[in-house]
Amino acid sequence: MKKLIEGSMAVAEAIKVCRPHVISAYPITPQTHVVENLSQFVADGELKSEFVNVESEFGAASVVLGSSATGARAFSCTTSQGLLLMLEVLYNIAGLRLPVVMVVANRAVSAPINIWCDHQDAVTVRDAGWIQLWAEDNQEAYDMCLQAYRIGETPEVSLPVMVNFDGFILTHAFEPVDVIEQKDADQFLPPYKPAQYLTTKNPLTFGLLVDPDYYAETRYRLQVAMEDSKKIIEDVADEFKSKFGRYSGGLVEKYRLDDADTAVISMGSVSGTIKEVVDSLRDEGKKIGLLRIRVLRPFPKEAIFAALKDVKNIIIMEKNISLGLEGMLATEIKACFYAKEKQPKVSGYIVGLGGRDIPQDSIRNTILKAEKELAQAEFVDLKHQLIGGVL
Amino acid sequence: MKKPEIKESLLAPGHKACAGCGEALAARIIMDAAGPNTIVTAATGCLEVFSTLYPQSAWKMPWIHSLFENSSAVAAGIEVALKAMGRENEAKVIAQGGDGATADIGIGCLSGMFERGHDVLYVCYDNEAYMNTGIQRSGLTPFEASTTTSPSGEISWGNKTDKKPMPEIAAAHKIPYVATATVGYVKDLEKKVKKALSIKGPKYLQVHCPCPLGWAHDPALTIKVAKTAVQTGLIPIFEMEQGKITSVRKIAKKQPVEEYLKLQARFRHLFKKPGGEAEIKRIQQIADNNIEKYGLM
Ligand SMILES: Cc1ncc(C[n+]2csc(CCOP(=O)(O)OP(=O)(O)O)c2C)c(N)n1
Ligand SMILES: [Mg+2]
């Protein structure tokens, strides 16, 4: 059934049909509507969850950790400063192999404080051991929430999953979203049945002190689970398609890449704008396509290489920067081609930081410029009058 | 003749606590008083470290350690999960933390847990410093104790502040039950654990636990040190219900604070440096204030 709803409502509706036992979150713009909607569902008796209002995001993450360890399905939602405040718990949830799902309404990181969209928040925490899914639009964010629980709760995965969707650009956008009936959702997502959890019936110790004799193996097993999850992510997307008719999954999205010699790479909602530019450049005879990263962790290096192996020119447009180096994707994409025979030219552009608009013209000009240069961490649309003096 | 029966404890022997560890003793008494139908959380600290070095665990009950500052929030998550899954009759929930975990880094999560009214007993093992990391001061380190981050020195008498009033801070949250206890009086400790667990809602229990290593006292004297702390008035033992003091452990025979201080090298400088007598008087004043405030005599 299609509904014209705000992105935050779409995500809340998706979580509702996932029937989490426990929801704990702390308000932060632009995530607030998601948790407000969920609170209302609980208040109206539409959703039978324990909604725990906490004193901080650190507390929220800790509450869902405890719930998940007790065998409950748990949900949280945050962004930006809240996500960074959670960081210590994020690593802990992953290390404990708890399939918590969290939606992140991606936003820039302070200072200076800025409430608008970029991807610095989730990119910064990409090493924490969470699977990271990145939506382009609200339908995809909706679908990803259901898939996230299926993926994370698969026994051989047993990892937390973060669903990323762009702050304001998606959270506050009204789009038609096809929502799933509860009974269909229940079929797709059966109750969570962990092999081990906190219970007096089988008293186990969780979160032990692990010394040098054993620690590396726990990290190795996390790494293996991450790698193995690539196949599960694709299987879950296939199953979702067979049930609901939409393919809204996979590790990467390939857009008009078949015969392309130039590929743009991006994540999130800006990909929609880039696709339009690709279309118009195609009309002008350019062999260009887009590769959208849907899953940042595990990093789909095989899928990326397979999609781009015949491409000569790669143009990365990303909303984050690893200060002192370059955009995160630039480094990681280049690594996909290490020791391969054919080496494409890889140009890295930083776009849309702190919610700066990314008009089609900028994308188009950047693509045309990239044909003639090898850009590294080049900021698009910088206002030179602002950086001449002291900012 | 029948051999005396040795009761199996829920915190099994063989863990790695130091000889004479007050915290280990307190934990064992608390767990046995709580019984097996309990889920337990722990903060990072000595207790977690000495009892769960993989692949061994001393815990015969479901137990989880997450981080230093979130034992209370994890316990809250467990409590709501049990409720949401219809398992609330399966287990009581106990959250544990050291004095640092409780009064310093974890006070935010703890306050949240109190405020929200979770049915959890929070136990603070008060050994009066960050022992696990090597005896650094905490908000519950007593006045003028020498620790590695509040050392006595040429121009220092040690820790500059007195113990943060955690029981009162807990009680200010209008929680139904707050109590202090000590390993010096284990029957009282046991009784308070049982009582706390019979009350619904958040409970706070702060247990004074001598640390032979950190306080530098003879490990054979743990119980004596703990009892002397009470008998001087420095550690008041009381219960607060609905915000009001409802019982206090009366001091049988008041002892001067010197009797307590001299047992522990963390106070040695008070007896060595010129001017120490005046400082000991200030500590005596703290004890006397307690005696008056809590009606200990
Ligand atoms: C965020 C964080 N900061 C610091 C530490 C280091 N640390 C671990 S245990 C501990 C002290 C514990 O003191 P306390 O809570 O009093 O427990 P005790 O060991 O004395 O029983 C510290 C500082 C940590 N693990 N995590
Ligand atoms: Mg301590």
Image (tube, coloured by chain):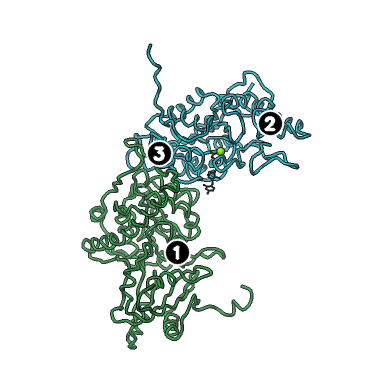
Chain colours: A green, B cyan
Instruction: Classify residue A142 as left or right of residue B233.
Output: left
Chain of the residue on which disc 2 is drawn: B
**Chain ID for label 3?**
B
Q: Quadrant of ligand 2?
A: top right
Residue at which label 1 appears: A123
Quadrant where the C terminus of chain A sits is bottom right
**Separation of marks 1 and 3 at Cα, in angstroms:** 37 Å
Q: Is residue B255 visible?
A: yes
**Marks 3/2 same chain:** yes
Position of residue B235 relative to residue A223, above or below, is above
- Outermost residue on the left side: it is A242
Residue A288 shows which numbered tag? none
Residue B188 picture location, percent across and down: 51, 23
Characterize the local packing of mark 1: few (<14), some (14-19) or many (20 or more) Cα atoms within 10 angstroms: many
Residue A135 x %, y % = 36, 66
Instruction: From the image, tell me which residue sits under label 2.
Output: B286
Three-letter code for the amino acid on which mark 3 is drawn: Gln
Is A304 left or right of B134, judged from the image as shown?
Answer: left
How far apart are the two marked residues, 3 and 2, measured between alpha carbons?
A: 43 Å
Picture coordinates of residue B150, whole percent (x, y) = 66, 42
- Amino acid type for the residue under numbered disc 2: Ile
* Residue A383 higher or lower than B71, as above or below: below
